[in-house]
Amino acid sequence: MGRSEDSTRARLFEQVSSLTFNLSRQAVGALAGRVGGLTLRIGSTLILDKAQRKRLSAEQRAWMKRAGEAIHDARTTAGLSIDGLAEALALEDKTVLQAMEQGSATVSFELILRLTSLLARNDPIPFLISLVRGFNPRLWALAEDWGIGHLPTMIERDRKWMNIYRGNEAVRQLPEAEFNQVLAFCRSSMETAMALRAGRWTPPPVPPGDGAIDDAAVRASENGPGSSA
């Protein structure tokens, strides 16, 4: 019984590995056609020791740490162990994956694509960009030359907005009409904030009789009953 399960699991890993490898080649082929040629193995696989990590900028170390956490979270969500992930990717040495999760490795674009196609099928672009930014500095330098270096920041901002919405269960349960009212208020608030930032916002005028302050009434209240103007 155990041997049969192992055999089934092995076939599954083989199918997944084959599929992700083919997806990687297709993705790279499409990218190569747009940028005039690109190799799957752009970037080298290197496990960094402490001395090598110290030579990196603080920003790069932070991106590597963030990318490693993304792999760990996606792997555990998928129910895969390090050994299982290495087998699915047809990697002989799992220490590369361990180093990636610890934020202490650089790897090829091919491996990044295969990890993305296996662990982030439903939302691949943020995952792919995070891994490229963290684990393939050479390719990221090219990406900045192509003018897409701002994408991680934009995606991170989008995620922050989404987290505000996802973190408020009461808003998510509103009827459609009430939700649209809240949405309109948020949109108006954003426009007002941007106008304030640009220094071009002025308060709307208050119509007479609609909350306008009566100066005489104010003075009378300050002077007390029976006082004259």
Image (tube, rainbow, N blue to C red):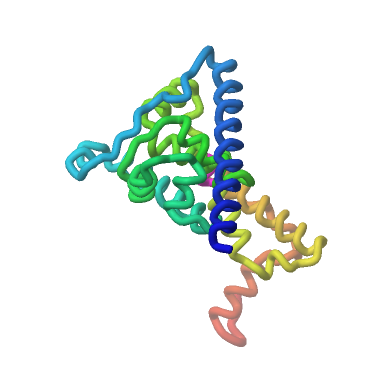
At 59% from the left edge and 31% from the top edge, which residue is drawn? 22
| Total labels drawn | 0
The residue closer to the viewer here, 227 or 119, is 119
Which of the 4 image quarters holds residue 23? top right
Quarter of the image containing the N terminus? bottom right
Can you say whether 179 is above or below 18 in the image?
Answer: below
In this view of the protein, can residue 7 be seen by the observer?
Answer: yes
The residue closer to the viewer here, 199 or 121, is 121
Which of the 4 image quarters holds residue 179? bottom right
Can you say whether 99 is above or below 151 in the image?
Answer: below
Q: Position of residue 72 (x, y in %)?
A: 44, 53
Is 42 magenta? The answer is: no
Is 156 magenta? The answer is: yes
Relative to 211, 192 lies left or right: left
At 47% from the left edge and 46% from the top edge, which residue is drawn? 87
Quarter of the image containing the C terminus? bottom right
At 71% from the left edge and 60% from the top edge, which residue is drawn? 182
Relative to 1, 143 lies left or right: left
- Tell me the magenta residue range: 153-157
Q: Assign the magenta stretch its main secondary structure.
A: helix
Q: Position of residue 140 (x, y in %)?
A: 42, 29
At 17% from the left edge and 41% from the top edge, which residue is drawn? 51
The residue closer to the viewer here, 29 or 154, is 29
Residue placed furthest toward the top: 36
Q: Position of residue 135 (x, y in %)?
A: 38, 37
Residue placed furthest toward the right: 177
In this view of the protein, can residue 199 be seen by the observer?
Answer: no
Q: Position of residue 95 (x, y in %)?
A: 33, 46
Residue placed furthest toward the left: 51
